[in-house]
Amino acid sequence: MKLNIDAVIQETSAYLSDDPITEDFLSVGDVYTKGSVDHTPYQPILDTIIESIRKHKVCRITYSPTADNVDKVYFLAPHRITAFHDNLYVVGRLVTEDGVAEPVNDHNNTFLLYRFKQAEITHRNTDLAPLVADQSEGAFGWFHSGDVFEAKILFKKEVAGYVTSRTWSNKQSVEYLENGDFVLTMTVRSRKELISWVLSFKDTATVLEPKDIRERVIAAARGILDNYRD
């Protein structure tokens, strides 16, 4: 990630400790990504968002929600900055345009940093627009796309070292079979992310449940095969 990581660490260290971050600490870290986004041009916007979070102030943001570069103006009570899959996201609540800042919906809102065009701190406080507690927190997947559900995936023993050494969900279990293969059972909140994750294991993973995920993985695999037919 080409974002100025040193500056971000310095800025966000206020949330962790009052002790300064030293150069020795900054020199031991490194970041490797696949297909990274250059966040460098967005450093001033990130600085503004961080200051807004610290001061509990609403931001007036200009944002392009889609790739067609049609800008929209929102009033956002930012609360958190999250890194996920080589992108930075600002998580908060959309609020009313003027007066006391009150939420305009009943859920948290997430914005990609690289789609910000502008961010300005206003005088309005964010006290009445806290983050909504997410009951699905801890389930597999970052984007909540509906109800939380249970999934069962059969893995071949070749990937046991990788899969079983990690926590994929706050509710997961592993059942080993006699041949060394195993079944991972876990709670999931994002169907799309689960499908992509399973496909990344190629022929070493098979969805057992739920049925709709199994069918969508089969359809995706057939589509990949069709791409390579002469």
Image: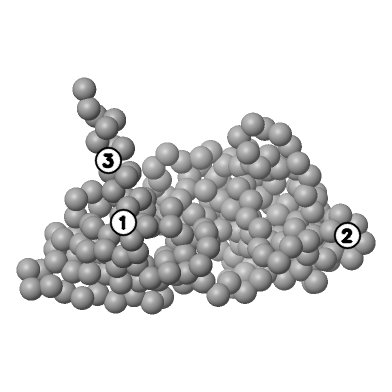
Give the labeled residue for mark 2: 123
Give the labeled residue for mark 1: 214
Q: Is residue 156 visible?
A: yes
The amino acid marked with disc number 2 is His
Q: Is residue 55 visible?
A: no
Indicate how the structure is coloured in the image: one colour
Q: Nearer the viewer, residue 121 or 68?
A: 68
The answer to which image quadrant residue 42 occupies is top right
Distance Cα–Cα, label 1 vs label 2: 51 Å
The dot on residue 222 is 3
The amino acid marked with disc number 1 is Arg
Distance Cα–Cα, label 1 vs label 3: 12 Å
Outermost residue toward the left? Answer: 179
Residue at image position (23%, 48%) is 202
Distance Cα–Cα, label 3 vs label 2: 55 Å
Question: Circle 3 sits in a helix, a strand or a loop, which is it?
Answer: helix
Earlier-in-chain disc, 3 versus 2: 2
Q: Residues within 10 Å of mark 1 (few under 14, many from 20)?
A: some
Residue at image position (62%, 47%) is 113
- Between marks 3 and 2 in the image, the one whose residue lies nearer the viewer: 3
